């Protein structure tokens, strides 16, 4: 099935859906509003982001007024119809992006406190600190951190820090960062390592961070009280594949599990310094 992305009309959250699910309803993972999945674009390589509509904002079937006498009109050409649709979608996406902070704050104030899914202490499915009973998922990295659902959209390895992102750069950004002891990606390729919950001695530092628009970011830094298992594959085209299982012994029972493909960010190189007061050679 082909996939495409569309934007939530309330908070601007980008959501991925299959073309076969067009017309169905889904809950926005950020503002929790019911929205209708738009029709997939005709061009699968289109760079435009579609905009969905709220489920309760659609007109009920049969509410359109049909004139008694219908005057035939010339149908617009296909190219004109496609152009008009693209212009409309572009304007709608741009407006939603520019107003995302204001819309998100209004929605949060009308909804009141966050749902119970953001404060529950019940362990998520598969959560355990016993790595012998933990199984690494074959699907992409998902889970829950600090009581908030997490669906990984981007992974990068930079300076020995492996970071997992959702909504990167947005007011609702969620991030997990793990400081590894190996600063060279080549030393991680093909390796597997575990950090048991009861291990003593040096441990990788783990940072969990959740942001909400208009609120102070929630950040938690850990050097204990977690269990970690990582399996790395090979390096291809400046990317490092792998799988991760991370369970944290916190109040919210934070957990991420699944497969990832990390972008390797090379270290910045300093420009060579020119010697001062050097006369040009003739």
Image (spheres, rainbow, N blue to C red):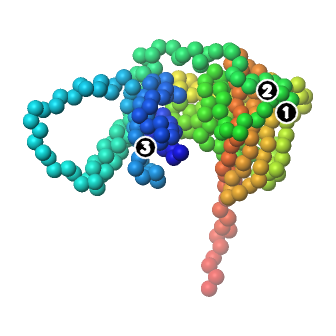
User: Is residue 205 in view from this perspective?
Assistant: no
Which of pointers 2 and 1 lies earlier in the amino acid sequence? 1
Q: Which mark is residue 195?
A: 1
Horizontal side of 42 relative to 228 (left or right) equals left
Q: Is residue 257 above or below residue 236?
A: above
At which x and y percent is residue 46?
43, 51
The residue under label 3 is: 40
The crowding category of the residue bearing disc 3, from other C-alpha atoms within 10 Å (few below 14, some 14 to 19, many at least 20), is many
- Helix, strand or loop at label 3? It is loop
At which x and y percent is residue 273?
67, 64
At which x and y percent is residue 206?
74, 32
Q: CA distance from mark 1 to mark 3?
A: 44 Å
Q: CA distance from mark 2 to mark 3?
A: 41 Å
Which of pointers 1 and 3 lies earlier in the amino acid sequence? 3
Pointer 2 and pointer 1: residues touching (CB < 8 Å)? yes
The answer to which image quadrant residue 230 occupies is: top right
The residue under label 2 is: 226
Q: Is residue 282 above or below residue 43?
A: below
Q: CA distance from mark 2 to mark 1?
A: 8 Å
Horizontal side of 208 relative to 81 (left or right) equals right
């Amino acid at each position: 099935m082909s996939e495409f992305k569309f934007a939530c009309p309330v908070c601007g959250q980008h959501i991925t859906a299959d073309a076969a699910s067009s017309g169905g309803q889904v809950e926005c993972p950020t503002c929790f509003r019911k929205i209708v999945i738009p029709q997939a674009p005709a061009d699968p390589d289109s760079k435009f982001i579609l905009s969905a509509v709220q489920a309760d904002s659609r007109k009920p079937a049969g509410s359109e007024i049909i004139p008694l006498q219908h005057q035939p009109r010339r149908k617009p050409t296909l190219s004109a119809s496609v152009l008009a649709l693209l212009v409309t979608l572009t304007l709608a996406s741009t407006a939603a992006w520019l107003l995302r902070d204001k819309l998100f704050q209004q929605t949060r104030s009308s909804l009141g406190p966050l749902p119970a899914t953001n404060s529950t202490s019940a362990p998520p499915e598969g959560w355990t600190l016993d790595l012998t009973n933990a199984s690494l998922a074959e699907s992409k990295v998902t889970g829950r951190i600090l009581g908030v659902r997490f669906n990984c959209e981007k992974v990068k390895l930079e300076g020995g820090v492996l970071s997992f992102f959702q909504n990167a750069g947005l007011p609702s950004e969620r991030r997990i960062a793990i400081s590894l002891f190996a600063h060279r990606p080549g030393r991680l390729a093909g390796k597997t390592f575990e950090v048991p919950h009861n291990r003593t001695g040096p441990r990788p530092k783990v940072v969990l961070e959740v942001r909400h628009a208009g609120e102070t970011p929630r950040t938690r830094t850990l050097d204990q009280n977690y269990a970690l298992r990582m399996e790395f594959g090979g390096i291809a085209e400046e990317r490092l594949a792998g799988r991760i299982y991370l369970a944290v012994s916190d109040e919210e029972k934070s957990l991420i599990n699944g497969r990832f493909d990390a972008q390797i960010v090379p270290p910045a190189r300093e420009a060579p310094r020119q010697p001062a007061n050097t006369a040009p050679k003739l």
